[in-house]
Amino acid sequence: MHLRSPSGANRLQIETMTFARQAGTAVFLVTLTLWIQCLGIAVLIHWARASVERGVARLSILHAAVLMIRFSILVIVLHFLQIFFWSVFYRWYCLPSWESSFYFSATSYSTVGYGDIVLPRVWRLLGPVESVTGVLMCGISVSFLFVVATKLVERESGAPPMQHVNGLDERSEAELENVS
């Protein structure tokens, strides 16, 4: 029995369906990742503000270091949670074990990408999407940690807060604070 290869029109239709499936899945996973990251950072911002309001001013070096370690650990946990959600998808649809799914997700998210484990052809575009998403989420986390460190330095030195580095005037900053 001789199997015919799909005609050009059928092959294009299959490729279009495959791409649409990958794109839809990517949109879902990226949206879930953004929700996790934004919710997690919002909780950390709330905690940071509460810490500052409780009188974190003039912290000892050790206490400031412990505070930064706590925030850093929570940010890392937040990233592992995002990697876990991607790995759940990979385990259900792409890879044979939880270990390989988590490993692939972690290497993609962190942009290491060893290449020793690859996704099936119908899902191969998700790896680069996860990499770009991971870079963006890490950037958001580093921004948060930088702001916390800046606030601790300002409080420790007694220096006034940095003024208008972002180019916003006081009215614009007040409007942004009232958005939430």
Image: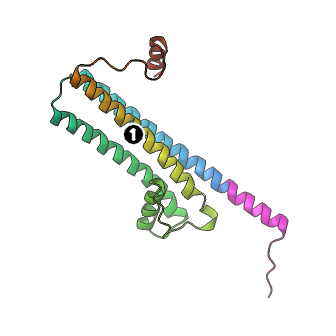
Task: Please name the residue shown 53% across and 67% down the image.
Answer: 118
**In the image shown, does 34 or 132 lie closer to the viewer?**
132
Looking at this rendering, what residue extends furthest in the top direction? Answer: 171
Residues rendered magenta in the picture: 1-20
Compared with residue 99, is residue 28 higher up or lower down, i.e. above or below? Answer: above
Residue drawn where x is 26% and y is 40% of the image: 70
* Residue toward you, 4 or 125: 125
| Colour approach in the figure | rainbow
On screen, residue 154 above or below 3: above
- Expressed as whole percent of the image width and height from the top left, the position of residue 178 reads 45, 17
User: For the residue marked with disc 1, what is the amino acid?
Assistant: Val
| Residue 56 in the figure: left or right of residue 18 | left
Q: Residue furthest bottom?
A: 1
Residue in the picture at 75% in, 63% down: 14
Q: Position of residue 13 (x, y in %)?
A: 78, 61
Q: Is residue 96 visible?
A: yes
Measured as percent of width and height from the top left, residue 149 is found at 30, 32
Instruction: Say if 38 sits above or below 97 in the image.
Output: above
Query: Which residue is at the front of the view, 53 or 89?
Result: 53
Residue 36 magenta-drawn?
no
Residue position for label 1:
142
Q: Is residue 12 magenta?
A: yes
Main SS category, magenta section: helix
